[in-house]
Amino acid sequence: DAKTTQPNSMESNEEEPVHLPCNHSTISGTDYIHWYRQLPSQGPEYVIHGLTSNVNNRMASLAIAEDRKSSTLILHRATLRDAAVYYCILKGGSGGGADGLTFGKGTHLIIQP
Amino acid sequence: ETGVTQTPRHLVMGMTNKKSLKCEQHLGHNAMYWYKQSAKKPLELMFVYNFKEQTENNSVPSRFSPECPNSSHLFLHLHTLQPEDSALYLCASSPKGRATNEKLFFGSGTQLSVL
């Protein structure tokens, strides 16, 4: 799977929007862009994923650049409970059995009250 | 509650002990995974099972021995561990494996300390 680059940490204020960037310049045409987050003392949880078009769900929005070499996870109104490590992961398929997801270091999001 | 339950939540063991970690999923998924998360390091994929068959072993030392008796249960048997094996061990499941848009569901992990 291709590599992603994220800032080590970001800080935002409560009730403001947060834009978390991810660069993936070596993305292939079949790679999906997945975002997970890991709250303290918990396992990672799924946030959102997309291929080419922007995606929205109840947790967040995913904006994907037209050339797909970067994407941005958008939390529309951050709360203290959104403080977590956010992982941007590319997932490509090549047929046959399961092979999981490869996690990087992610972005540590700090929310200030 | 993700539908993936891991026990115990915390485990302290000596280097000569034998212990087992348990993972159970109630989601009807067919693929299950073990990940290791050491302090200050990214999650590392250890083992993958798909339809009870091991499909991936990422060069994990033999002191870690996985077992998947059915699609709902996954075990990690531990013996003669080293202090550097102290970490958070996470179990995950997914519906059927390698689909590129498939979500993984994680348990809360077992925090292991090897003395």
Image (spheres, coloured by chain):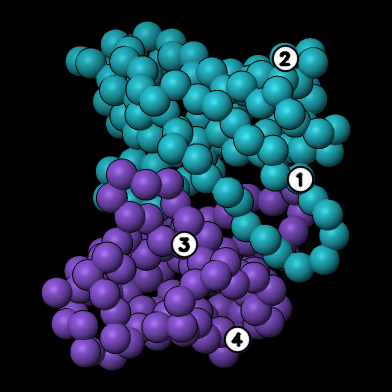
Chain colours: A cyan, B purple
Identify which residue, B54 or B62, lies in the foreground: B62
Q: Mark 3 sits on what residue? A: B35
Residue B76 visible in image: no
Instruction: Reply above or below: B83 against B36.
Output: below
Q: Residues within 10 Å of mark 3 (few under 14, many from 20)?
A: many
Residue B11 visible in image: yes
Task: Tell whether A86 sits left or right of A32.
Answer: left
- Disc 3 to disc 4, how far (Cα)? 19 Å
Amino acid tagged 4: Asn
Amino acid tagged 2: Ala
Q: Return the mark for residue A65.
A: 2
Question: Percent position (x, y) of residue B111?
Answer: 26, 64
Q: Return the mark for residue B70.
A: 4
Question: Percent position (x, y) of residue B61?
Answer: 45, 76
- Disc 4 to disc 2, how far (Cα)? 42 Å
Q: Return the mark for residue A92.
A: 1
